[in-house]
Amino acid sequence: MRKTIIIGSALVAALLPGSAFADGSTQGIEQVAGNHQSADSTATSTQKNPSNTAISLSILSPGSKTGNVSQSNSSNATSSAGNTNGTTQNASQNGGGGGGGEQGIGQVAGSKQSADSSATSTQKNPSNTAINVSILSPGSSSGNVSQSNSSNATSSAGNTNGTTQNGSQNAGGGKGGGGAVQGIGQEAYNKQKAESDATSTQENPSNEAVSLSILGKGSGTGNVSQSNSSNATSSAGNTNGTTQNASQNGGGGGGMQDGHGSCQSCDEHGGGATVQGIGQLVESRQKASSDATSDQSGASNTAGSLDLGLGKGKKDMAHSAAAPAPAGNVSQSNSSNATSSAGNTNGTTQNASQNAGGGKGTTVQGIGQAAFNGQKASSSATSTQWCPTNVAFGPFGNVSQSNSSNATSSAGNTNGTTQNPSQNAGFKWPVMAR
């Protein structure tokens, strides 16, 4: 890839008249920018044998009430790693108003970025238990019960690099004298790597909600909501935008004029050659890998409601008790989800403009543009669910039960390269008779 630029530079150098422009100005600009970034992030959350227990016991307590019960066990791990690099190079040259001018601009920008992120969440044997017992307690009621066990891992890694190179040359507007020699070389290199990994493991989560009513006419049971979830989300991405702008103006030299402003011997005293050369090279390499794994085993939800007697044989209690209250709704779910995404976005723009000016003489213009891009995106998502169980027994309202295992993976690359070369040889001075 670099050989093309070297050959192009040698060609431009061979065209330079050298000492023929000794009366002109010599300008040189060289810019080099190097950047190396590395970011590592790790998050680990481990939860073993968490337990929540709520027990309500009513004996000979008419009208007793139990409030809502909310129980949860969660293990969360979040990790992120990222690099942002923006390199801007601006070079401007003005040859003034003398004779021939020699101008040279060289810009090099290199960037290397690496981001690694890992998140792991492990939850073992979480347990939630809610028990409500009502004995000889007409009109007693228990509130809603909400139980949940969750293990979540989120990991993200990303790199963003934007490189802008602007080179502008103006040979000036001198009269007569030599021609103009202009050369611009721009090179941009970028290498990015992002890896992300998220793992969520949940073993033997258990939820139990039991309501027992004995000789308790009018007792009611609230809604029961039980859930076990294992989630893993991973993302890795690279974004690279490189813009190269090069502009050359050969100036307006060429003819020799006398004091009265009339062209004099333009064919003999016309300006020298105008040589313009622009070389642009862009290289980009990106890699993004993402992996998400969710594993759920032995998930269990149990909801039981038992009503015995309804106050029969207890007329005093039966008359004082409210009408039988229905049992609440039951919602039970076990879910294992894994989502992974990896993507690369690269946008390269190269703009080159040359204007030889209006001088007389030979005009040589050369533009070389090269853009190379390599992208790779890998994504993997795995969701595993073993032996999920939902059990609901007793007089309940609506019962909703679900077991789900979902895995979503996506990988994509987007590359947009635009090259716009423009050349204008300018207006040549006519040959005039003596």
Image: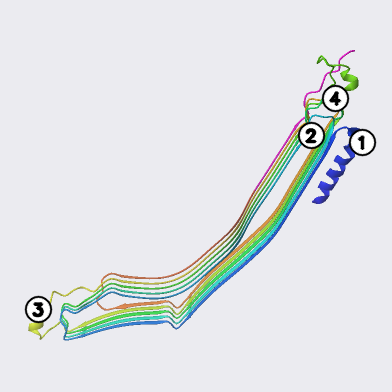
| Residue positioned most to the top | 434
How far apart are the two marked residues, 3 and 4, measured between alpha carbons?
Answer: 118 Å
Give the residue pinned by disc 1.
19
Which amino acid type corresponds to the residue marked 3 in the rendered image? Ser
Residues shaded magenta? 416-434
Q: Earlier in the sequence, mark 3 or mark 2?
A: 2
Give the residue pinned by disc 4.
176
Give the residue pinned by disc 3.
320
The answer to the question of whether label 1 and label 3 lie on touching residues, with beta carbons closer than 8 A, is no
At label 3, counting other C-alpha atoms closer than 10 Å, the crowd grade (few under 14, some 14-19, many 20 or more) is some
- Measuring from the top left, give residue 317's x and y in whole percent: 10, 82
How far apart are the two marked residues, 3 and 2, measured between alpha carbons?
Answer: 106 Å
Where 98 falls versus 77 (above or below)?
above
At label 2, counting other C-alpha atoms closer than 10 Å, the crowd grade (few under 14, some 14-19, many 20 or more) is many
Q: Earlier in the sequence, mark 3 or mark 4?
A: 4
The answer to the question of whether label 4 and label 2 lie on touching residues, with beta carbons closer than 8 A, is no
How far apart are the two marked residues, 1 and 2, measured between alpha carbons?
Answer: 17 Å
Near-viewer residue (234 or 326): 234
Describe the element under mark 1 as helix, strand or loop. helix
Displayed quadrant of residue 428: top right
Describe the element under mark 4 as helix, strand or loop. loop
- Measuring from the top left, give residue 274's x and y in whole percent: 83, 31
Near-viewer residue (108 or 155): 108
Q: Is residue 361 magenta?
A: no
How far apart are the two marked residues, 4 and 2, measured between alpha carbons?
Answer: 14 Å
Q: Which mark is residue 95?
A: 2
